[in-house]
């Protein structure tokens, strides 16, 4: 796939855009890099679907995962599995939704929506690009589910089917009910405003008396859906919190709504006056709008993934030397399974084959495969690289080393209830204050004028309605969430912002979080390399896709590779070439014949021999991420810093030197240790955990805020409160201080709305409140609070360098 | 002036129709995916060449 011959100009593959090798495959005037690409092209051209190539150049890019095992999807013939996967099924037709991570361009949409031209059984297919899903309707008597999936993977769009697909259908992330309630509130509010305009402009006297009555009653009718439908969520929430003997923000809101409604009802029906129905509609409209604003969801990201979403559904089980594809749920301890190249080990098991090369990048974040000898334990979540291996299952998939974590009690608690939101604390005080002043003024006036006393009582409740108070939190947090999202920092929900503001200790995972495989430090030890040998090594490593090869390749830089015709890569062992009659080997000690490799290396070693003669070895150590040193020095002033690592302690000295003295290092931590460490730390402080692999999952869940780092946010990341794109790693201090400022903004806007309330209540207590003042004061306070919070968060984000041009 | 009674009725009826249509669109999933349709509209429907037999043959090869 990579060029081994630079003498001829490299041609690009028509399908995927990679450079074609020597053995070019040519169909017509198109060239292809491999059989796979050629096959896809042939399938498409036979079916007249070549528009695929007109929409985008080389649309096949990034679809390269060749795992051409024809019996891989045999489990889809199992009826029970089928029933769990399909959305709908009747006698003739089935509907199914696949998640296809490889959907990436307009061509993908086009091809997948034209599936019916390739397969006669497919009736309809529709792509949701952002969710990377395709919904397919097919006739099961013409095509089976297995054939469908086989075709999809043959044309390069392999659906991802895993255990969590089977367990339950995902609930919709967007709250449709809220939008509908908002629509009703908006509709009623708009119409009520129209009917109320004459009142505001004192044109009432020109109107016919009939009209006034009609308008008032129309407003009353329009207010009913607002009170009984749009506001229903608030009654439920207020009732629940009262039942637990607490007062949340919704209690004073409900108090305000009821006071407004019943007082207006009394005015309209009893007194033939206008009432405040339009204010009521506006209040609910703005409140719901704020709620929606806060509910910014990142629908394409998943925050609650557990082990089920990375486990395969089926594995190859060996029964009397026969391969049998069985669903994972039917595995038992003692079963012998076969794991092929690029397949995940589904359960803790013991290796029966001589050697395996296991990539634990899912688990630890370290992508260099670990070599494992016969008889050793392989943990679930490892990915085999190289020849197929046989394993015996030691523990059921649901009881493995890593999956134990999910059965831990930590995963059953809902973190959003750990911290009482700021608004909840204030609303308690606020409610009592309002009630006290309402009853106080009622008592005071009742001695002189009872009807005035009732009016004052109601108007205190109405004007003190905490709309501004209730709006400041959602609008501030909603905007904060948005700004974070623009910086590639995606929060699960708004309450994470409030929790982030209280952090005082930060725990980092080392491998994959502080260190970055891409910043490897490579050094060479041994006989100095000639230019010729370097060129030779360059062409060897550029042939291989092994991560260590990539790093050596990067380290060698722009050296001209020597053209070689015969290169062999033995997966998990090394690379071998024949050059001018000599055997050159690059790889592990056994493969290369390197006799005395250094003991206790601090990184990975790659050995080089020519004709069995030891030349030297490359020492590769994962380096720190860009800006980590600066990050830790910035954070250590105001936060307690900890580093947890699953590695041995040999790097401590070097790390201390690079990261600073004030950091507490802990090595040899297994996933369970990390969880207990966080638990201990939580007793004294609010913790932020930054991690990446599955081995951090327990700690991420236990911490006050858990951030998962990911190089590609749409890829796998463990369950967490937030997902951070690795490129924004250095912005963590800015994020933390911005979260703190958002909390300050909320406080400031509370002060603002308190001022409004004091003015309003003091007028109301004295019985001076006229409908006009009320009508002006209420929307003014809400809108000014919304404007204040939005402007303040944007200004602070700009100062902290978090506001990027919108064009990006 | 009595005509205003009628006009109010009509306007309310009209507005509620729109509200109803919005409800229907929302529940029908019209707002679920607001990106893909923007791409889909650019696809051309090319007239198919008449090689239907060939395409069925290729299916059996799959």
Image: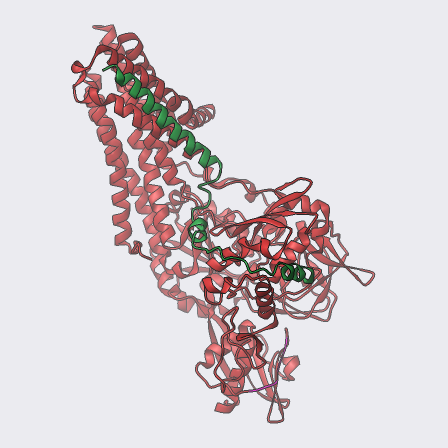
Chain colours: A red, B green
Q: Which of A142 and A533 is in front in this view?
A: A142
Q: In which quarter of the image is the N terminus of chain A?
A: bottom right
Residue A506 is situated, as x and y percent measured from the top left of the image, at: 42, 53
Q: In this view, does A511 lie to the left or right of A155?
A: left
Image coordinates for residue A696, horizontal then vertical, percent: 53, 55
In the image, is A397 to the left or to the right of A508? Answer: right
**Foreground residue among A696 and A315:** A315
Residue at 16 percent across and 15 percent down: it is A206
Q: In which quarter of the image is residue A247?
A: top left
Q: Can residue A165 be seen in this view?
A: yes
* Residue sitting at the far right: A320
Magenta stretch: includes residue A567: yes
Relative to A106, is A562 above or below? Answer: below
The x and y percentages for residue B6 are: 30, 18
Viewer can see residue A638: no
**Lateral position of residue A325 relative to residue A161, left or right:** right
The residue furthest front is: B50
Q: What stretch is highlighted in magenta?
A: A564-570
* Residue A206 sits inside the magenta stretch: no
Q: Is residue A94 above or below residue A236?
A: below
| Residue nearest the observer in this picture, A46 or A600 | A46
Total labels: the figure holds 0
Q: Which quarter of the image is occupied by the C terminus of chain A?
A: bottom left
The residue depicted at 25 percent of the width and 27 percent of the height is A778
Vertical arrangement, residue A399 with respect to residue A768, above or below: below
- x, y percent for residue A703: 48, 48
């Amino acid at each position: 796939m990579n060029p081994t011959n630079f003498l001829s100009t490299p041609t690009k593959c028509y399908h995927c855009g990679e450079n074609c090798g020597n053995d070019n495959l040519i169909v017509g005037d198109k060239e292809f890099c491999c059989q796979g690409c050629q096959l896809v092209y042939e399938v498409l051209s036979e079916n007249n679907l070549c528009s695929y190539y007109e929409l985008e150049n080389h649309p096949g890019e990034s679809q390269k995962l060749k795992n051409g095992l024809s019996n891989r999807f045999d489990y889809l013939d199992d009826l029970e599995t089928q029933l769990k996967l399909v959305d709908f099924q009747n006698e003739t037709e089935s509907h199914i939704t696949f998640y296809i991570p490889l959907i990436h361009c307009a061509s993908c949409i086009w091809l997948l929506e034209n599936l019916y031209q390739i397969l006669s059984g497919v009736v309809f297919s529709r792509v949701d690009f952002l969710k990377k899903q395709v919904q397919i309707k097919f006739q099961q008597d013409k095509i089976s589910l297995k054939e469908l999936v086989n075709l999809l993977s043959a044309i390069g769009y392999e659906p991802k089917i895993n255990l969590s697909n089977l367990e339950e259908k995902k609930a919709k992330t967007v709250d449709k009910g809220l939008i509908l309630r908002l629509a009703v509130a908006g509709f009623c509010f708009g119409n009520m405003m129209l009917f109320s305009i004459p009142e505001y402009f004192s044109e009432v006297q020109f109107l016919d008396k009939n009209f006034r009555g009609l308008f008032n009653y129309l407003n009353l009718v329009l207010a009913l859906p607002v009170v009984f439908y749009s506001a229903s969520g608030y009654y439920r929430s207020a009732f629940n919190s009262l039942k637990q003997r607490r007062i949340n923000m919704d209690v004073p809101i409900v108090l305000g709504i009821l006071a407004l409604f019943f007082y207006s009802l009394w005015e309209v029906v009893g007194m033939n006056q206008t009432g405040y129905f339009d204010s009521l509609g506006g209040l609910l409209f703005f409140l719901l709008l704020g709620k929606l604003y806060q509910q910014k969801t990142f629908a394409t990201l998943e925050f609650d993934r557990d082990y089920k979403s990375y486990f395969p559904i089926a594995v190859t089980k060996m029964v009397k030397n026969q391969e049998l594809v069985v669903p994972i749920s039917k595995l038992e301890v003692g079963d012998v399974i076969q794991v092929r190249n690029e397949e995940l080990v589904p359960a803790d098991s013991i290796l029966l084959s001589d050697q395996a090369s296991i990539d634990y990048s899912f688990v630890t974040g370290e992508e260099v495969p670990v070599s494992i000898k016969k008889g050793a334990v392989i943990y679930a979540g490892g990915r085999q690289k190289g020849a197929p291996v046989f394993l015996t299952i030691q523990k059921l998939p649901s009881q493995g080393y890593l999956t134990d974590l999910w059965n831990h009690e930590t995963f059953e608690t809902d973190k959003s209830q750990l911290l009482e939101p700021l608004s909840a604390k204030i609303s308690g005080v606020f409610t009592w204050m309002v009630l006290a002043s309402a009853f106080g003024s009622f008592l005071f006036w009742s001695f002189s004028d009872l009807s005035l006393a009732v009016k004052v009582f109601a108007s205190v409740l109405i004007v003190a309605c905490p709309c501004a108070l209730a709006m400041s939190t959602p609008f501030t947090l909603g905007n904060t969430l948005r700004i974070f999202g623009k910086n590639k920092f995606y929060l699960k929900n708004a309450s994470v912002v409030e929790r982030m503001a209280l952090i005082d200790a930060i725990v980092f995972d080392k491998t994959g979080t502080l260190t970055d495989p891409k910043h490897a430090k490579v050094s060479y030890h041994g006989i100095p390399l000639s230019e010729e040998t370097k060129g030779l090594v360059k062409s060897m490593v550029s042939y291989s896709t092994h991560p260590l090869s990539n790093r050596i390749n990067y380290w060698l830089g722009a050296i001209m590779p020597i053209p070689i015709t015969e290169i062999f890569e033995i997966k998990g062992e090394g690379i071998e070439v024949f050059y001018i009659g000599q055997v050159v080997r690059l790889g592990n000690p056994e493969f290369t014949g390197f006799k005395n490799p250094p003991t206790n290396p601090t990184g990975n070693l790659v050995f080089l021999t020519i004709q069995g003669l030891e030349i030297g070895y490359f020492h590769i150590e994962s380096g720190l991420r860009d800006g980590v040193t600066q990050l830790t020095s910035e954070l250590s002033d105001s936060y307690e810093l900890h580093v947890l690592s699953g590695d041995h302690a040999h790097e401590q000295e070097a790390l201390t030197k690079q990261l600073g003295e004030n950091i507490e290092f802990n090595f040899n931590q297994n996933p369970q240790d990390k969880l207990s460490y966080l638990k201990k730390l939580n007793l004294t402080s609010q913790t932020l955990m930054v991690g990446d692999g599955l081995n951090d999952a327990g700690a991420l869940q236990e911490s006050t805020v858990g951030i998962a780092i990911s190089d590609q946010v749409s890829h796998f990341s463990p369950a967490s409160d937030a997902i951070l794109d690795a490129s924004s790693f250095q912005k963590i201090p800015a994020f933390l201080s911005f979260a703190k400022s958002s909390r300050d903004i909320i406080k400031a806007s509370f002060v603002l709305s308190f001022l409004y309330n004091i003015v309003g209540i003091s007028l109301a207590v004295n019985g001076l409140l006229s409908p006009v003042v009320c009508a002006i004061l209420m929307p003014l306070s809400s809108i000014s609070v919304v404007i204040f919070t939005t402007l303040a968060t944007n200004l602070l984000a700009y100062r902290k360098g978090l506001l990027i041009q919108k064009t990006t | 002036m009595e005509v205003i009674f009628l006009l109010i009725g009509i306007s309310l009826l009209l507005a509620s129709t729109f509200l109803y249509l919005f409800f229907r669109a929302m529940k029908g999933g019209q707002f679920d995916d607001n990106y893909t349709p923007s791409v889909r509209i650019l696809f051309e429907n090319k007239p198919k060449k008449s090689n239907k037999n060939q395409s069925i043959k290729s299916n059996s090869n799959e």
